[in-house]
Amino acid sequence: MAVKNQNATFSCSILKDLLVKTNSHWLLSLLLWVVFVLPAQAIDLRVAIKKNTQNIKIGSSTSAIIKDQTGSKIGELSPMAATSAQSRSGQIALEKVQAGEITIEPTGDGYVWIGDRWYRGKVQLVNEGNQLTAINHVDLEHYLYSVVGAEAVSSWPIEALKAQAVAARSYALYKRKTEANGLYDLDTTQRTQVYKGLDTEYITTHEAVNSTAGQIMTYNGNVILAAFHSSSGGHTENVEDIWTSPLPYLRGVVDYDHQSPVFEWNKTFSLSQLANLIGGIGKFKTMVPEETTPQGRVVTMKIIGDRGTQKLTGKELRKLLDLRSTLFRVSTKGSQVQVYGRGFGHGLGLSQWGAYYLAKQGIKYHQILVHYYQNSTLSQLD
């Protein structure tokens, strides 16, 4: 059966309630701000741009200094002249120099070219097992100029972009603290955050980042796992119903994402398509959810065919069928199978389309944040 739209309309009273609740929470957060001021420091992020490759295109917009692993200067790069770094017998060869590890630092306000894009900061080239990894060392705030533009829509209301900036800053610092390895803190994919260098910087993303500089969401003085997604389909989830352990700030709340283009969606498959994709069931007959979250997302699904059954998780089925979320149901009509769903993403934390709608109604970014991150506090990296 189709997933019904139970959140298509939102009354003024709901928005008023949100304003009252978030305003009172904001006043409390403001009082706690003085308590939760974290140590001052410039934060250098290490972002893996390219991993496990034999060669990488490298360049600089200005003349650049080439250094080895000891920090000693071993050469220079001419401006606007692309070259290739290569792995050779455990060493990195670049231009006329060779070293076990190489760092390229543009002079002045220069940018570095890594692979196929321009980036701020500098690039470190590391050789591991004759495979190169290119790591962009970039200031946290400069990193966010790009991330906000890659993860959100640059033309959205500025309050929505500010909320995205604070969430992305918090998320980056949480991942840096909990998942960094010896080489890098983050990569450029959705596994951490999408980062495309100068390609996704805009005037509005600069404004959103600069006007929230150093602001993060905290719980008990610690930066939170500020998960975010595109659209929940009407209600976000408690984190333990999607991932593992419960967190006091990732609780399910009413979402205001009804204007999202992916609030409702559907996808059609033929019976033979499903049989081929799933395998081991023969001719597809039906799907039956065995376990769902309180908001209806599929945790496990039983797929029944005329020759057998399969049991898949909602995540496995979403990937296999290329669905926008695990909030879906299935119905069979003749030789076709209709998948009806809502939302896009895991449904945890900040809803980007919810933030968009609330910002259009005049809700401020700090109010948006404390709605989607319950029991959290907006704090300042002083």
Image: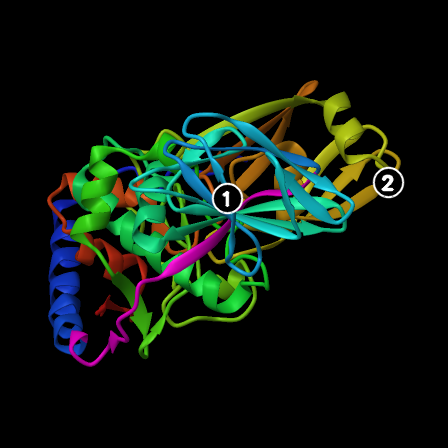
Residue 181 placement, left or right of 150:
right
Q: Position of residue 102 (x, y in %)?
A: 57, 49
Can I make out residue 112 in this image? yes
Q: Mark 2 to mark 1: distance in Å?
A: 41 Å
- The amino acid type found where label 1 is placed reads Thr
Image x and y of residue 269, in percent:
65, 23
Which picture quadrant has residue 119? top left
Say whether residue 236 is left or right of residue 258. Answer: right
**Residue 35 is inside the magenta segment:** yes
Residue carrying label 1: 188
Marks 2 and 1 close (CB-CB < 8 Å): no
The residue at which mark 2 appears reads as 308
- For marks 2 and 1, the one nearer the N-term is 1
- Disc number lying in front (2 or 1): 1
- Quadrant of residue 251 within the rendered picture: bottom left
Q: Residues within 10 Å of mark 1 (few under 14, many from 20)?
A: some
Q: Is residue 364 above or below residue 149?
A: below
Q: Residue 71, which numbered label? A: none
| Residue 92 painted magenta | no
Residue at 13%, 57% (x, y): give it: 19
Q: Amino acid at mark 2?
A: Gly
Residue range of the region highlighted in magenta in the rendering: 33-53
Classed neighbour count for the residue bearing mark 2: other residues with Cα under 10 Å, few (<14), some (14–19), many (≥20): few
Q: Left or right of 259: which side holds 281?
A: right
Q: Which image quadrant is residue 53 in?
A: top right
| Place of residue 12 in the rendered image (x, y in percent of width and height, measured from the top left) | 12, 46
The answer to whether residue 226 is visible is no
The N terminus appears in which quarter of the rendering? Answer: top right
> Which residue is depicted at the point 46% across and 31% down?
117
